[in-house]
Image (cartoon, rainbow, N blue to C red):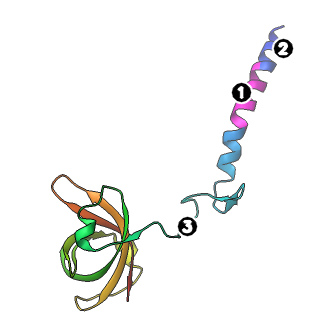
Amino acid sequence: MKKLLVTLTLAALFHLSAPAWSQAQNSGGGFQSGRRVANQSGGGYTGGGAQAVSVAEALKLPDDTWVSLSGKIDRQLGDEKYQFSDASGCIVIEIDDEDWRGLSVGPDDTVNIRGEVDQELTRRKIDVQYIGKR
């Protein structure tokens, strides 16, 4: 009787852990069940979602809103922080070092940025995920 109970317990544990083990084995990126596995292979969703706005509009949008802006980077404010401006105003943007992807930009260059509105305690900024020259 004890052998049967131990065998059933082990079988139940194996049955419950098999899906998690299978998922861990298949998490190396690529497609699973017809959908992309997010951030497993360094890729992710690349389509739309970011609305084209001006700086003045971005300053009024809710936290975590995806936006696309066109303008100039006027100056560096600190580590990974810059002042970005267009005809409607200026806003602080944050560009992680790896997001530059080797791109060089000066204050006279017009750039397109895509990122997320980030409401901090005292101000809004844009957390840039993509930058490109026009």
Query: Which secondary structure, mark 3?
Result: loop
**Which residue is under mark 3?**
43
Taking the magenta stretch, the answer to whether it contains residue 55 is: no
Task: Give the quadrant of residue 132.
Answer: bottom left
Q: Amino acid at mark 1?
A: Leu
Q: Is residue 30 left or right of residue 109?
A: right
| The residue stretch that appears in magenta | 9-18
Is the residue 34 above or below the residue 17 in the image?
below
| Residue under the image location 53 percent in, 70 percent down | 47
Say whether marks 2 and 1 touch (CB < 8 Å). no
Residue 89 picture quarter: bottom left
- Of labels 2 and 1, earlier in sequence is 2
Q: Main secondary structure of the magenta part?
A: helix
Image spot of residue 125 (x, y percent)? 25, 64
Residue 56 image offset from top left, x and y in percent: 22, 70
Name the residue: 32% across, 72% down: 53
Q: Looking at the image, is 42 positioned above or below residue 133?
A: above
Q: Label 3 sits on what residue type?
A: Gly
Task: Give the residue type that dot 2 points to.
Answer: Leu
One can see residue 79 in this view: no
Question: Which percent across, then down, holds residue 122?
Answer: 15, 55
Lower sequence index among marks 2 and 3: 2
10 Å crowding of disc 2: few (<14), some (14-19), many (20+): few
Q: Which mark is residue 4?
A: 2
Of 60 and 92, nearer the camera is 60
Q: Residue at x 28, y 82 (%)?
A: 71
Q: Which residue is mark 1?
A: 13
Position of the N terminus by quadrant: top right
Q: CA distance from mark 2 to mark 1?
A: 14 Å
